[in-house]
Amino acid sequence: MFNPFVPQSLICRESELERVCALLRQDSDFVVTGVPGIGRRTLIRSAACQEGSRCLEIDLLRCRNAGQFLRFLADGIVDAFSEPSEIAQIQQWSLNQPLSVDQTLETEARLVWPKTLGKEWPLFEDLLSLPQYLAEWLNCQVVIIFHNFPHIRSWDRQGKWESHLRQEIERQNRVSYALIATVAEPWMTASQLPVIALTPLSDRELQPWVIGTMATAGLKFDPESQALELFLSYVQGHMKDAITLAQRLWLGCNAIASPAPELIQAHLVHSTMLGLAQDMAVVFEALLLLLPSTQARVLESLALDPTDSPQSNAYIKKHQLSRGGGLQGALTSLEQKGLIYGPQFGYRIALPLLDFWLKQRLR
């Protein structure tokens, strides 16, 4: 079934797209920050596509040890260079390496190596040199996207692998490293890595996409019921949640009647949001259980009562929060996890669906 709510291009990020494209043309490494679902990966992929760069992605949150990291890196390289001539070139390169190309699988080729404990480091150095080799051979650029970069420290306790990656980020040409993070870390600033921060879209920026996409589906918001205003207030400029809510509205309208009703009224927007929150309830409950009690308490307080000054005595007393370093630590940790915005946006919940669910749960 045709889904008009799957964006065919980047939405409302023209200036950020041009900046990333310029960085790629300059063979620069960079950081893209923002909360989950704000469009960080889409931005980098769009820029790489526009500039004709090869793109491979590694989510370090999924890597629990050095062996898994090597596996994801090797698979990412082969996925990005999967043409027969490119696989042949990788095979040629591997003749001088402790790796080989396994083409016995029916689906795709794969880089393999002997599983010798303690020999991961030489493989790491070899695999990191392969994208540069292929980029020079093809006369192209490669973009390696690292998601959740700080998670490497969960197994790289002494920082050896992270330190080497940082050196490669500074040294290699033809290979650009794009780090996706919630907030920029001090070392990124100290290394003078350009930081592109994705903030929530304004209602003015998001409204044309919402109206146009609904029109494509034969729908429009009822101006008498302020349905559009309610939609925008629920999604809070968060692109992924806007897409999710719009798609559910469309599906809901088609389920109500055929053909679908032309006007979307406010009560339908609200009931659809309630349904989405109910679908996510188990995930959100688990999230709260995994958070330290202090952080969970702060999160609930900000859902009910966003504030510019959560450290104020009045706010602490009102919500019975801990004082001093405990509160500031909770705020910092929640911001790093992408669950709240910091002082720039007035200490509020960063994920609209979570915000809506918490409000419904606590009231």
Image (cartoon, rainbow, N blue to C red):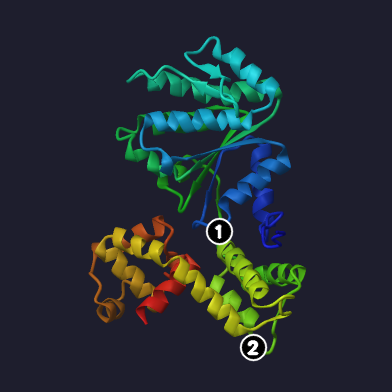
Q: Mark 2 packing: few (<14 Cα in 10 Å), some, or many (20+)?
A: some
The correct choice, above or below, for 284 with respect to 193 in the image is: below
Quarter holding the N terminus is bottom right
Relative to 317, 78 lies left or right: right
Residue 307: in sight, yes or no? no
- Spot occupied by residue 81 in the image (x, y as percentages of width and height): 64, 28
Q: Position of residue 280 (x, y in %)?
A: 45, 65
In the image, which disc is placed on residue 119?
Answer: none
Nearest to the observer: residue 111 or residue 23? 111
Residue found farthest to the top: 96
Pick out the residue farthest to the bottom: 224
How far apart in space, not on screen, are marks 1 and 2 (Cα)? 28 Å
The residue indicated by pointer 2 is: 225
- At 72% from the left and 40% from the top, the residue drawn is 51
| Residue that appears at 51% across and 56% down | 34
Q: Amino acid at mark 2?
A: Ser
Look at label 1 and name its amino acid.
Ile
Q: Residues within 10 Å of mark 1 (few under 14, many from 20)?
A: many
On the image, the x and y values in percent for residue 197 come to: 55, 55
Q: Secondary structure at mark 2?
A: loop
Task: Give the quarter of the figure containing the C terminus.
Answer: bottom left
Residue at the location (45% across, 18% down)? 113
The quarter holding residue 266 reads: bottom right
Which residue is rendered at x = 64% and y = 77% of the image? 256
Residue 38 disc label: 1
54 vs 247, nearest the viewer: 247
Residue 191 in view in this figure = yes
Label 1 element class: loop
Disc with the residue nearer the chain's start (1 vs 2): 1
